[in-house]
Image (cartoon, grey):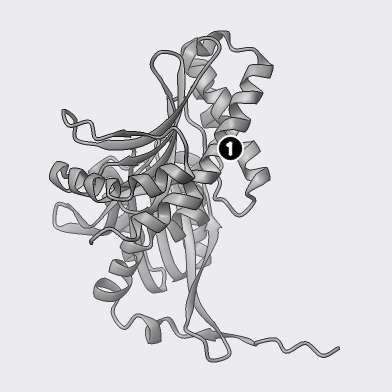
């Protein structure tokens, strides 16, 4: 039986984005989840042109679970020595923990340079990502990101973190590491996150300032949340009020939701809670397994329900 399949063809990036600064960089700012998925870290609060002296980087953001700074430098061409020098200047100037160099082609000598930096610049992790455009037959072009260089320190970082933190934070790290692994089994298309020794783990909900969160809260409670923090309190409370217009409809899909405007704080959240049978340090392995399964099922519901309503919000 003959299959009627389309043919993939390459598209010149310059046909898609005529100008790097005014076309590609704004697109990446608004679609940062696509880059996050490739490099395996959740980038939030992205903005353009972070300045360092007389220089400025294309994009600067933060890693969702640590609030470490992330700088992103774009080139719709082959990498060059000038941009290599710039990313090093930016990294040192803003105190970045992560540097992402996005280019049409990362030349071999620059791949070696990034590898050397990952080996020797222990405080900074460098990523090299190649971007290309493709289309199927006469379809609209789509971007394809390919990870070329990544830091080789993830396991070392986790080991060092485990050795340096107290028992409670070790438990956070252990549970979230297991949770990420189990969630990836259920949702293999989901981007990989690196668990941290924090009381929460978050990832983007498809719009800047909106994140899905797993968190340990007070009174031995574990929560699944839609967390809203665009850094502008008035904007946050407006978004919360707009979502609340759909409360009856959303509540019918997600039982036992808590709508927490938190008027005394900047952020707002919508959450469901599970009472744990014991403090985190005393949870038995079977209890942890039960908690993880609940967290997976509830997060799956949040991801199915909330994006539809987030997309209804005014820009």
Of residues 135 and 248, the one nearer the viewer is 248
Residue 114 in sight: no
Question: Would residue 268 be seen by someone viewing this image from the given angle?
Answer: yes
Q: Secondary structure at mark 1?
A: helix
Which quarter of the rendered picture does the C terminus lie within? bottom left
Q: Quadrant of the N terminus?
A: bottom right
Residue 165 lies, in percent from the top left, at 46, 16
Question: x, y percentage for residue 266?
Answer: 19, 35
Image position of 151 (left or right of 81): right
Whether 100 is drawn above or below 7: the answer is above
156 above or below 105? above
Q: Residue at x 63, y 44 (%)?
A: 184
The mark total stands at 1
Q: Check the image and report above or below for 80 versus 216.
A: below
Q: Is 186 displayed left or right of 145 in the figure?
A: right
Q: In which quarter of the view is residue 85 placed?
A: bottom left
Q: Return the x and y of residue 213 as percentages of the image width and height.
A: 43, 37
Relative to residue 124, is residue 150 drawn left or right?
right
Q: Tell me the residue that label 1 is attached to.
A: 296
48 and 117: which one is in front?
48
Q: Badge 1: how crowded within 10 Å, few (<14), some, or many (20+)?
A: some
Q: Nearer the viewer, residue 34 or 231?
A: 231
Spot occupied by residue 18 in the image (x, y as percentages of width and height): 31, 83
Residue drawn where x is 60% and y is 29% of the image: 292
Task: Name the outermost residue toward the right.
Answer: 1
């Amino acid at each position: 039986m003959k299959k009627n399949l389309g043919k993939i063809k390459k598209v010149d990036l310059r046909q898609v984005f005529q100008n790097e600064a005014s076309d590609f960089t704004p697109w990446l700012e608004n679609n940062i989840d696509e880059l996050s998925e490739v490099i395996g870290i959740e980038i939030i609060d992205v903005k353009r042109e972070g300045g360092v002296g007389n220089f400025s980087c294309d994009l600067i953001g933060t890693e969702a679970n640590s609030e470490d700074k992330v700088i992103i430098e774009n080139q719709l061409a082959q990498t060059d020595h000038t941009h290599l020098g710039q990313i090093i200047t930016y990294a040192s100037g803003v105190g970045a923990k992560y540097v992402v160099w996005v280019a049409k082609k990362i030349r071999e000598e620059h791949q070696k340079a990034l590898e050397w930096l990952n080996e020797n610049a222990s405080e900074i992790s460098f990523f090299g990502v190649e971007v290309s455009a493709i289309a199927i037959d006469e379809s609209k072009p789509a971007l394809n990101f390919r990870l070329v260089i990544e830091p080789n320190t993830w396991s070392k970082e986790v080991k060092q973190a485990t050795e340096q933190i107290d028992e409670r934070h070790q438990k956070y790290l252990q549970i979230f590491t297991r949770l990420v692994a189990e969630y990836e089994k259920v949702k293999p298309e989901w981007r990989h996150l690196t668990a941290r020794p924090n009381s929460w783990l978050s990832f983007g909900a498809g719009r800047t300032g909106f994140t899905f969160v797993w968190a340990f809260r007070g009174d031995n409670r574990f929560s699944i949340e839609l967390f809203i923090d665009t850094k502008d309190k008035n904007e946050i409370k407006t978004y919360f009020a707009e979502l609340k217009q759909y409360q009856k409809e959303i509540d019918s899909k997600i039982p036992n939701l808590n709508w927490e405007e938190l008027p005394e704080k900047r952020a707002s959240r919508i959450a469901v809670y599970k009472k744990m049978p014991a403090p985190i340090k005393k949870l038995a392995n079977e209890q942890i397994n039960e908690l993880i399964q609940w967290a997976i099922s509830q997060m799956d519901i949040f991801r199915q329900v909330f994006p539809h309503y987030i997309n209804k919000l005014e820009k």
